[in-house]
């Protein structure tokens, strides 16, 4: 499969010559008072859950199988697995209000979530965690889990639920490939891009590779983030390609 991708930063305007991606409603940015006092800004969002959605090969690859919803809370129990509707539009329980604060950070090459969440993600794909990370140094020397190549792993999806700017819930879908796991350039093994931490949770570069990320800090409005699925297929790359360089 031909894989192309485009990664760039743009300021004040959308720079691509084609159509703008279909961005999500505005997602609330949680303010960090200490960072503001230090003349800086962090981009933290509140995520209430992750929904793992597998491609259903029994229907000729045209549909998606039952979803597993994992609530994200500061202390989610290892057995947490609320039942949801059996389709890709399943929603978390309405009374789920507590979420997990996550830093959006391009300085991290991978993402970090609590150990019990990582265990549930790995278990969904049929694997046990291969090792435990050094929580004090966050030293990354290899994947925490490897996903077996069963079915259409390149088409599995992930839905995430965020606290919206208007106290609403914003649901965003991305492909599991590029976010949850990615193919090793030499071996082709589907190595996990999510790691365990008991410290600050982070969505790193693997999150930015799965989405178009629009980070806004207007003068007369609270800061917010908007997301859009980034499809790594030639037609979408051409549609959103950057304009040619000026000579």
Image (tube, rainbow, N blue to C red):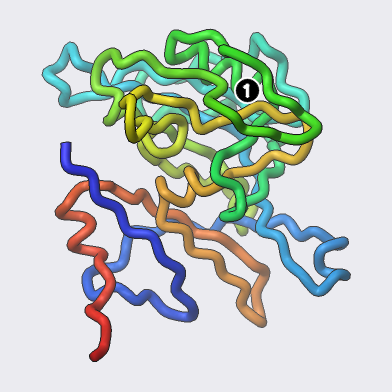
Closer-to-camera residue (102/159): 102
x%, y% of residue 223? 64, 67
Closer-to-camera residue (198/71): 198
Please, is residue 236 above or below residue 110 in the view? Answer: below
Residue drawn at x 28%, y 72% is 242
Residue lying furthest left? 60
Answer with the quarter of the image where residue 102 lies: top right
Residue drawn at x 44%, y 73% is 10
Q: Residues within 10 Å of mark 1 (few under 14, many from 20)?
A: many
Please, is residue 124 above or below residue 212 in the view? Answer: above
SS category of the residue bearing label 1: helix
Q: Which of the image's four quarters has the N terminus? A: top left
Tag 1 residue: 117
Relative to 215, is 36 on the left or the right?
right
x%, y% of residue 48? 62, 36
Residue drawn at x 33%, y 25% is 187
Please, is residue 42 above or below residue 102 in the view? Answer: below
Closer-to-camera residue (67/14): 14
Residue drawn at x 61%, y 58% is 165
Please, is residue 229 above or below residue 199 in the view? Answer: below
Relative to 107, is 146 on the left or the right?
left
Residue lying furthest bottom? 247
Q: Which of the image's four quarters has the C terminus? A: bottom left
x%, y% of residue 131? 62, 15
Relative to 99, is 173 on the left or the right?
left
């Amino acid at each position: 499969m031909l894989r192309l991708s485009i990664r760039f930063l743009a300021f004040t305007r959308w720079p691509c010559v084609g159509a703008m991606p279909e961005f999500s409603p505005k997602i609330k940015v949680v303010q960090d008072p200490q960072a503001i006092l230090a003349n800086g800004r962090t981009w933290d969002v509140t995520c209430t859950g992750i929904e793992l959605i597998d491609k259903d090969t029994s229907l000729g690859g045209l549909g998606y199988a039952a979803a597993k919803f994992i609530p994200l809370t500061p202390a989610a129990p290892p057995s947490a697995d609320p039942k949801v509707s059996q389709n890709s539009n399943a929603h978390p329980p309405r009374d789920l209000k507590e979420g997990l604060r996550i830093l959006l950070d391009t300085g991290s090459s991978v993402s970090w979530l609590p150990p019990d969440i990582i265990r549930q993600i790995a278990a969904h794909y049929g694997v046990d965690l291969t090792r435990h990370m050094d929580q004090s140094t966050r030293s990354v020397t290899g994947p925490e889990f490897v996903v077996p190549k069963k079915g259409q792993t390149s088409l599995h999806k992930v839905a995430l639920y965020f606290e919206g700017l208007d106290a609403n819930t914003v649901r965003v879908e991305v492909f599991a490939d590029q976010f949850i796991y990615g193919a090793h350039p030499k071996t082709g093994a589907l190595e996990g891009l999510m790691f365990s931490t008991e410290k600050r949770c982070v969505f790193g570069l693997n999150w930015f590779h799965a989405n178009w990320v629009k980070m806004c800090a207007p003068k007369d409005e609270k800061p917010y983030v908007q997301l859009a699925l980034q499809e790594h297929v030639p037609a979408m790359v051409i549609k959103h390609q950057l304009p040619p360089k000026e000579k």
